[in-house]
Image (cartoon, coloured by chain):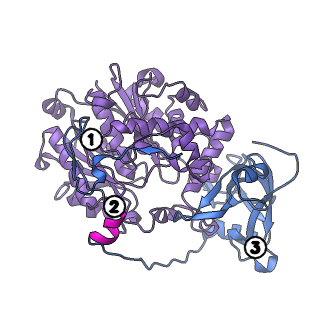
Amino acid sequence: MAARVVHHKRHGAATRVVAPDAPPRLPMRGKALSDVEFQKTVPTVWWEPQLEYRWDAGAAISRFLTGLKEGKIYGVRCRQCGRTVTPPRAFCELDFKPMDEWVELADTGTINTFSICYITWDMKPLRKPQIPAVVEIDGTVPRVGFLHLIGGVSGTSIAAVRRQVQVGMPVRAVWKPRDRRQGAITDIISFEPLKAKRRRT
Amino acid sequence: MVGAGMSLFVRRALETGKELSYYAAAQALESAGVKRKDIEAVIMATAPDAFDGVHMKGDWLLDGAGGVRKPYMRAYVGGGSGVFSIISGWTLVASGLFDLVLVVGEEKMSSCQPHPQGAFITIFDHIIERPLGPNLLWIFSLEQNRYMSTYGIRNDDIALVSVKNKRNALAHPAAQVAASVTVKEVLASEVVAWPVHRLMVSPVSDGAAAIVLASEQVARRLTDKPVWVQGVGWSLDTSYWGNRDLAYPRYVEKAARMAYEMAGVTEPQKEIHVAEPYDPFAYKELHHLEGLLLSEKGKAPEDLAQGRFERSGPLPSCPSGGLMGVGNPIAAAGVMKLCELFWQLRKEAGARQVPGNPERGVAQAWGDLMQIGTVAVLGTH
């Protein structure tokens, strides 16, 4: 069932001014261009930026990435506020002092939230959806985590995915083979739901 | 606040950002009964340079914003920029430095090809998030699901925001995506990133909006119906967004409490008569109504279903039609909300006028990496 969209007068290319009967009562200006006008009729100029970057990962995240290469997820602990958090950071952003220690966390966690995404960044459809999630990593206090992907899910429909992936579900990291790890977030291929009964939200 | 103006909001405008800014700024000046030469300083709110592909676009837009040879500043906190603009303008007037300040919000998102989402990708952390192949919808769909899971909210409840705002926008002459749709139709629209359906997402827009701010004395000379800035507030939460409680925008609450305290508002649910919370996605209006303390945590969907936020309801929310109905030229959309409160509080909103005797309203915007709340309380006293 299609939505009944009410098109205003200006959608005709000729209309330049809408004199409203509601405020602002002064005429409002703007000319809407159709795709055809934009592609064919009006003068346009095209530019594709050529920019490249190479970033170092900094003090804390470099160590985090080195840990991933070894199959370990690291967090950091601040003794003042008592938090153990990941992704690691060099300083506690609340107490504004250096973090006190590095903590090796488990490679398991809990799905804090997830989505089933059927489009790419440029709005192209995806047949097999991506399942991004925030994963709370075991060993953090309070439970916190980072963005990653959920894998090991069969089927592509919302119903199929939701049967297998739920908020509060325990997950475990699926690692790339050791010799293919690069010291990158993608050394973890994804987090896969564990079959265990443990739940928390 | 002594004047307001807008351009039309459209998917793709023939006009440049400068030209759109000029339309809005000229209209705001005209409605205030002042000329550009009377303006002492200009605030320009406009979001990422990457939309336009123009570096330092705030400075490039200067001519359209009426800022030539004047003290001029860009207000830029992503999606929060629109309401941050009045905060910036207010500080200039409140400092005593200027008596008359023009505030302009502009966005031209259509230039970025093939889709402005490409400009948004760089908001994700370049070391540990971008390699995962994210797109902007992820953060919204993740936040919406956490909100729904925490409070047991159904997608039907959220779809009702699209229904309300698109319908409200039918009475807004600048509206881009006004429509009469049902909850069923919203839920039948394509799933872009579950739980977000296409009709729960605001559009890509080009447009501009502007307001004129004056010191108390000058305002009283210019109009017998000034709208006063009673309170402003803003706050940012950590950029480690995976460490945040995604179910509740605590930073919006902090911003709201700051603005309410300044305005002397102690019971916002009674003392706020009309609200324009930021609604770039359907659930965000509900999320923000809770952060603004206008609903209890997790209860905004229920309040909405009971008609509390309808234009004719006890606490009208987004009577303009919001971003879901009028459109979402980022920074301009926030200024549009300020314009709406200006017209509502002066009882000039015509077909959009909320009933009764609204004396105080709140406008709010949100942005950066889901981390800023910007709030302004406006009133007739």
Q: What secondary structure prevails in the magenta region?
A: helix
Q: Which residues are magenta?
A: A33-41
Which residue is situated farthest in the front direction here? A1
- Observer-side mark, 1 or 3, equals 3
Q: Amino acid at mark 2?
A: Ser
Using residue A144 as the reference point, say whether residue A25 is left or right of it: left
The answer to whether B116 is drawn above or below residue A43 in the figure is: above
Question: In the image shown, does A76 or B281 lie closer to the viewer?
Answer: B281
Please identify which colour was used for chain B in the image.
purple
Tag 1 subunit:
B
Q: Which mark is residue B95?
A: 1
Q: Which residue is mark 2?
A: A34
Instruction: Measuring from the top left, give residue B236's x and y in whole percent.
Output: 50, 47
Which residue is situated farthest in the right direction here? A196
Is disc 2 surrounded by few (<14), some (14 to 19) or many (20+) residues within 10 Å?
some
Q: Could you tell me if residue B201 is visible in this image?
A: yes
Q: Which residue is mark 3?
A: A69
Q: Amino acid at mark 1?
A: Ser
